[in-house]
Image (cartoon, helix red, strand yellow):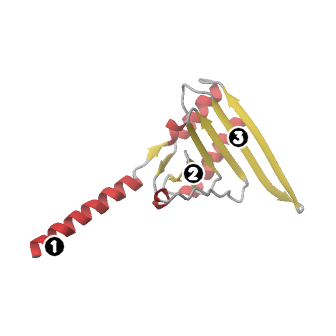
Amino acid sequence: MKRKNIILLSIAIIIIVIIGVYALYPQSLEDVVSSEERLYVLHHFHDVEDGEPIVEFKEYEFEKGSEKALKIREILGGYTYHRGLRVLSWDNDLGISREGNFIQILSGSNTLSSGGTGEILMNSRIYSIDYWGRKKNRALLEEILDVLE
């Protein structure tokens, strides 16, 4: 009886470790941007100044292999994402940080949306960016916005 309990406990621990590794294993964002497809970036900016809302919307299109497309792919390659508990749900609400910047990147069949909150929406699923999300996500947004200017 004791031996059976030890075996069941060992199996449960192994399953928990496998799920943990699967959920926390980092993957590069570089593969989001295909080097064989055009790249589209949509930038939304929301703010309030003197009680009046400010809303700006810009669209960018880059040919495959263009300098800016390659630079954005390189920037994404410096960041990772991982699954979290939200990936288990169908919840795909993504907020916007206080800075008001929100970007969407479309390349081939891949989409990536980021509002600087520490989470990204990629291909209709929520993932966590790096392990210290919010700061890293804001840095990612700033780097991409610098390329767009």
Rendered residue at 39%/51% (across/down)? 25
Closer to us: 124 or 74? 124
Q: Earlier in the sequence, mark 3 or mark 1?
A: 1
Q: How crowded is mark 1: few (under 14 residues within 10 Å), some or many (20 or more)?
A: few
Closer to us: 24 or 142? 24
Q: In which quarter of the image is residue 20?
A: bottom left
Proximity of marks 3 and 1: CB atoms separated by less than 8 Å: no
Tell me the element at label 1.
helix
For the C terminus, give its image quadrant.
Answer: top right
Q: Name the residue under label 2.
A: 120
Please state which amino acid type lies under the numbered disc 1: Asn
Q: Earlier in the sequence, mark 2 or mark 3?
A: 3
Rendered residue at 65%/52% (across/down)? 115
For the N terminus, give its image quadrant.
Answer: bottom left
User: Depth-wise, is mark 2 or mark 1 nearer the camera?
Assistant: 1
Rendered residue at 59%/34% (across/down)? 107
Please state which amino acid type lies under the numbered disc 3: Leu
Q: Earlier in the sequence, mark 2 or mark 1?
A: 1
Q: Is 142 on the left-hand or right-hand side of 51?
A: left
Q: Is 69 on the left-hand or right-hand side of 5?
A: right
Tell me the element at label 2.
strand
Is 123 rendered above or below residue 148?
below
Residue 145 at x, y = what percent?
69, 41
Please state which amino acid type lies under the numbered disc 2: Ile
Residue 36 at x, y = what percent?
54, 25
Q: Name the residue under label 3.
A: 42
Q: Mark 1 points at which residue?
A: 5
Q: Distance between the residues labelled 2 and 1?
A: 41 Å
